[in-house]
Amino acid sequence: MNIRQLGERGLISTIHRLQATPAMGYIGIGDDAAFLPPSEKGWLATSDMLVEGTHFRWQWMDPEQLGEKAVAVNVSDIAAMGGLPKVCLTSLGVDGEVDVQVIEGIYRGVARALDRYGAVLIGGDTVESSAGLVLDVMMLGEPSAAGPVLRRGARPGDRLVVTGRLGAAYGGLQLLERGVRWPGTSMLERSLLTAQMAPLARVEAGVALAPLVHAMTDISDGLVSELRELSQFGSVGVRITESLLPIDQATQELAAELDARVSDWAYYGGEDYELLAAIAPSRMPEARRRLEQIGLAFCEVGVITDEPGVIAVTAEGEVLLDDARAYDPFAASRIL
């Protein structure tokens, strides 16, 4: 059966059936609008969409993987502000000829990801789209006790830390564009495809770091883009030590095979969804201890300076990193 045969009410009923029931006090799918009880700490809100042909291709991933990733990239924004995801709404644009099983797969993936992060679906919208599938997710979360952590606030002398590997998601994209399909044929391919197709939002890390950091963001558009965001307030700059970038062996091996500069993948590749934080030196030991308690290490990659600009210290000397190469969704193309 396709979606046109099922109809909008049937489609909404199908989506509803696949989701968990909201907690007591919440009103979710079934009324004209959802209802959320007041939150003393306020709410964090974010929205991200995945568009067929721009963010994904069906020959790259199955519907459940798409649903999981759509949730994860939104939860990552909540994690970057030290918050906990609570509820989400989805808006779906899809061709009426698409089989209902595709939508069921997407929303099974949505449900699985929401269960992982402790959130639920409470509503949304559906509409016909003849230009390919569009899945938009709006996520609401609550700040931790430390309150919302902002991008601005970094101070000269702060250490810059990253919660995990960089460049791996871009490596996974390179494999997909060269015809490698999930799960690949080697551990290297599986590792990089996982980074691209199944990112994990660092919610626990965000909550753990929130009371300690001066500024924090997630690395969705590449390290340089996020460093630019982190340093654009307060007349501060950044000095990165390139040899400290957390680039794993799989990413290095693929970059070497493709004769690419692997540091560029870390700087400009994007979709790593790790956290980037500015932390005072005196708080670094406590930050490290807290992350070790949840089984996660972080890597110090640089320092906030009082001179504007993003500088990389490389084996060849100091380099001013080019903001023009940072990700822009409306740029015609990027060459890494």
Image: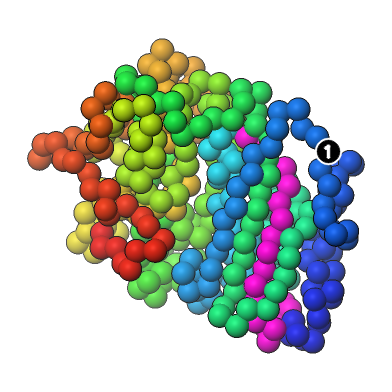
Between 187 and 8, the one lying in front of the other is 8
- In the image, which residues are magenta? 83-103
Image quarter in which the N terminus is found: bottom right
Q: How is the image coloured?
A: rainbow
**Relative horizontal placement of residue 35, taking residue 47 as reference (left or right):** right
**Relative horizontal placement of residue 176, taking residue 14 as reference (left or right):** left
Tell me the element at label 1: loop
Q: Residue at x 59, y 74 (%)?
A: 133
Q: Residue at x 89, y 41 (%)?
A: 25
Instruction: Tell me residue 228's x, y (percent).
Output: 34, 40
Q: Is residue 324 above or below residue 205?
A: below
Residue 321 lies in quadrant: top left
Q: Residue at x 32, y 44 (%)?
A: 224
Residue 297 lies in quadrant: top left
Q: Residue furthest left?
A: 316
Image quarter in which the C terminus is found: bottom left
Mark 1 nearby-residue class (10 Å; few <14, some 14–19, many ≥20): few
Q: Is residue 88 covered in magenta?
A: yes
Instruction: Tell me residue 127's x, y (percent).
Output: 70, 74
Residue 130 visible somewhere in the drawing? yes
Residue 298 lies in quadrant: top left
Residue kind at label 1, given as amino acid type: Pro
Residue 85 visible somewhere in the drawing? no
Instruction: Tell me residue 242's x, y (percent).
Output: 24, 38
**Relative horizontal placement of residue 79, taking residue 220 as reference (left or right):** right
Instruction: Tell me residue 258's x, y (percent).
Output: 24, 64
Residue that numbered label 1 is attached to:
37
Q: Is residue 195 covered in magenta?
A: no
Q: Residue at x 47, y 38 (%)?
A: 217
The total number of labels drawn is 1
